[in-house]
């Protein structure tokens, strides 16, 4: 599989809703349209809610992957200005 | 702007809104809003703007809190009776949100001090209860090209409009001159439902926040009229008047004047 260039990594392990979304939203605001952010999280609900919220904001979700029993990685490409 | 963990929590419901976000919240924290009147309208406007994190809020009011105010002026309490309303509201707003710098201006607005008091603020909110001050505020905002969010209440009815000088009508385009003294009764004479200024003040605060974040349509060129008994909101178009004495093509008002004192008894 083709490697994706990650422009920013965000570690929000230990955060719960809604701060998982608050931090992810601010993370996306800090990159440019077309760039990719990788979010590392361990709050199970956020593995579902963050991708949904990012799609609602108009961004693309490139990957949602459970990397171990307690952690997920979500990759988001910023598609629209804030 | 880097938010503290506390600020992330406090403003989380704003930050996750696409129309606000971190960038909009930063604009809110940098905004400077001046509210004329810390009474029925000024209390809810200031309360919500303080909660929203507006960085600087000035309150202009020279009156002191009375027991009869507490039926509607929600920033005051029995503990602040006889205290200046501006100081009483400042205490309340700063207790709600220590991020906010509240400036209490215990003066009565007049043609001499108004331009100087207004000049450093981004948005002016009119929460006054008399026509001379309402017209003075309008004229000063037109001269300084400051956005003005105006509200008025009586009995069971209230109105709101947003005036963007140079971009739509002003208060004088709607009513060129104040009504004769005594024609329109005051809340003192006619009464007002205590919750009514809460509704109108919340609408004013909404307009202010929309202007700060630059989202949505401001209520310019329209007067929104709320009838609490009939539960009706009506939006009435206000045309810009080219012959307006303050914002028209050839304005006749070139400097500010104070209207006669008899109005002040309204």
Image (cartoon, coloured by chain):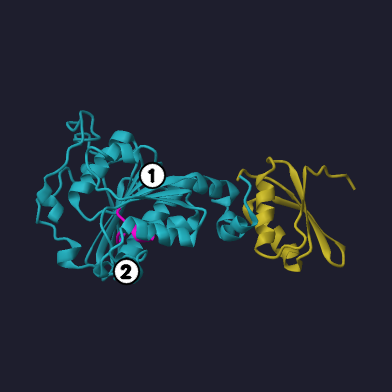
Chain colours: A yellow, B cyan
In x, y percent, where is residue B87? 36, 57
- Which residue was labeled with disc 1? B123
Q: Main secondary structure of the magenta part?
A: loop
Residue sitting at x 49%, y 56%: B52
**Snapshot quadrant of residue B183:** bottom left
**Snapshot quadrant of residue B38:** bottom left
- The reply to the same-chain question for discs 1 and 2 is yes
Q: CA distance from mark 1 to mark 2?
A: 25 Å
In the drawing, does residue B2 fall left or right of residue B31?
A: right
Residue sitting at x 31%, y 45%: B221
In x, y percent, where is residue A73? 81, 57
Task: Examine the rendered structure and indicate whether residue B25 appears above or below residue B156.
Answer: above
The magenta segment is B37-44
**Would you say residue B202 is visible in this rendering?**
no
Q: How many marks?
A: 2
- Which residue was labeled with disc 2? B195
In this orientation, which residue lies closer to the viewer: A29 or B226? A29
């Amino acid at each position: 599989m083709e490697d994706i260039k990650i422009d920013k990594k965000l570690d929000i392990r230990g955060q719960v809703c809604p701060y998982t979304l608050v931090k992810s939203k601010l993370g996306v605001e800090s990159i440019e349209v077309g760039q990719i952010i990788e979010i590392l999280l361990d709050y199970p609900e956020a593995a579902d809610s963050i991708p949904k919220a990012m799609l609602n904001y108009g961004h693309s979700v490139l990957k949602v992957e459970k990397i171990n029993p307690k952690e997920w990685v979500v990759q988001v490409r910023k598609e629209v200005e804030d | 702007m880097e938010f503290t963990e506390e600020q992330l929590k406090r403003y989380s419901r704003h930050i996750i809104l696409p129309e606000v976000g971190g960038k909009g919240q930063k604009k809110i924290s940098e905004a400077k809003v001046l509210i004329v009147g810390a009474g029925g309208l000024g209390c809810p406007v200031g309360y919500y703007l303080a909660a929203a994190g507006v960085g600087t809020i000035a309150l202009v009011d020279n009156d002191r809190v009375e027991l009869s105010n507490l039926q509607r002026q929600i920033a005051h309490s029995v503990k602040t009776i006889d205290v200046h309303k501006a100081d009483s509201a400042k205490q309340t707003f700063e207790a709600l949100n220590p991020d906010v710098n509240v400036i209490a201006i215990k003066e009565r607005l007049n043609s001499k001090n108004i331009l100087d008091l207004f000049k450093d603020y981004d948005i002016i909110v009119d929460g006054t209860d008399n026509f001379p001050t309402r017209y003075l505020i309008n004229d000063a905002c037109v001269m300084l090209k400051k956005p003005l969010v105006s509200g008025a209440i009586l009995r069971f009815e209230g109105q709101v409009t947003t005036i963007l000088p140079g971009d739509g009508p002003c208060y004088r385009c709607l009513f060129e001159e104040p009504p004769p003294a005594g024609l329109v009764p005051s809340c003192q004479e006619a009464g007002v439902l205590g919750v009514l200024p809460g509704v109108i003040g919340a609408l004013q605060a909404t307009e202010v926040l929309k202007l700060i974040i630059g989202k949505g349509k401001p209520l310019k060129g329209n007067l929104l009229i709320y009838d609490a008994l009939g539960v009706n909101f009506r939006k009435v178009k206000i045309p810009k008047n080219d012959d307006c004495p303050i914002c028209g093509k050839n304005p006749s008002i070139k400097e500010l004047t104070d209207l006669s004192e008899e109005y002040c008894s309204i």
